Amino acid sequence: NTLTVENYIGTIGFNKIDCKGREYDYLALNCKKELLKNSKVRNAINYAIDTQGIINKVFYGRYYETKFPLDYGNFAYSFINENNYDLEKAKKILKDDGWTLQSKVWQKNENGIIKQLRFNLIVNNSDENRKKAAELIEKQLENFGIQIDLIVVDDNVYKTYIDNKNYDMIMAGIYNSTTPSLSTFFEKGNLSNYSNSEIKSIIRESKDISDYNLLQEKYSKIIKIYQEEHPFISLYRNKNTLVYSPSIRGTISPNNYNIFYNIETWYKKGI
């Protein structure tokens, strides 16, 4: 949807601030599949995807590139700078792991058996933008040397894939809660078939912690593990806009937990 606030009320007479929305899309990598068990392969896939390029082409730049499921205003999210798109880094990861690019496909000889980086990618056809994003991911990865069989299915078949976990990669999305939990991404039943005992332990411990600083420390550890492992690849989230009168002053910093965040600092010019 390319409609903006300007389509409705024009371009003058108001100020606006954008903030990250709760609609979060990601690419789940099935960590139970032979080649995707290898975190180095998963990391290379992550760095070979140009998320900002996808946002520009599919959403005309009106979405945010996202780094992690909690990066939309949650206090526990401690931003760790990461350049998601880096083809040279992706190449180095694979080369260091013994892969070579031959006939435009990354491959490796293991005990006399030639293995190639070829995967299927499932996407539902009911979400046109997600389908377009999947098509761009297919092209990006194939240009890099990872062959993709894009499978576009209706919602019923898509659900069957999810239930049976019989995919290599799958495009997915979630509407983040105002009381977010990482269980969807890291605990039993997650779309990546990923299991990490340290993350599970941290999530369990965090349920009984009320100290914000300690919680942020715990969640920072989860983020660090995520960036080392990449069981799924964060893609993008929607952009929300707060429109307000130019006469309003103060610290205006809305987020998806409180659109009136810092309202105690707001005041009207001239009063």
Image (spheres, helix red, strand yellow):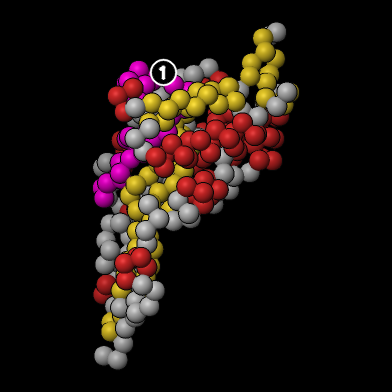
In the foreground, 212 or 179: 179
Q: Nearer the viewer, residue 205 or 227?
A: 227
39 left or right of 13 in image = right
Horizontal and vertical percent position of residue 239: 38, 56
Of residues 218 and 189, the one nearer the viewer is 189
Q: Is residue 189 visible?
A: no
Image coordinates for residue 65, horizontal then vertical, percent = 48, 50
Q: Bin the neighbour count of mark 1 within 10 Å (Cα to Cα): few under 14, some 14-19, many 20 and up.
A: some
Q: Position of residue 171 (x, y in %)?
A: 42, 33
Q: Amino acid at mark 1?
A: Asn
Q: Quadrant of residue 166?
A: top left
Q: Which residues are magenta?
A: 158-186
Residue annotated with mark 1: 166
Name above or below for residue 202 compared with residue 250: above
> Looking at the image, which is closer to me, 38 or 259?
259
Determine if the magenta segment contains residue 168: yes
The mark tally for this picture is 1
Q: Is residue 35 left or right of residue 10?
A: right
For the point 35% across and 53% down, the residue is 21
Does 244 appear above or below 181?
A: below
* Residue 68 vertical position relative to residue 28 in the rendered view, above or below: below
Query: Is label 1 in a helix, a strand or a loop?
Result: loop
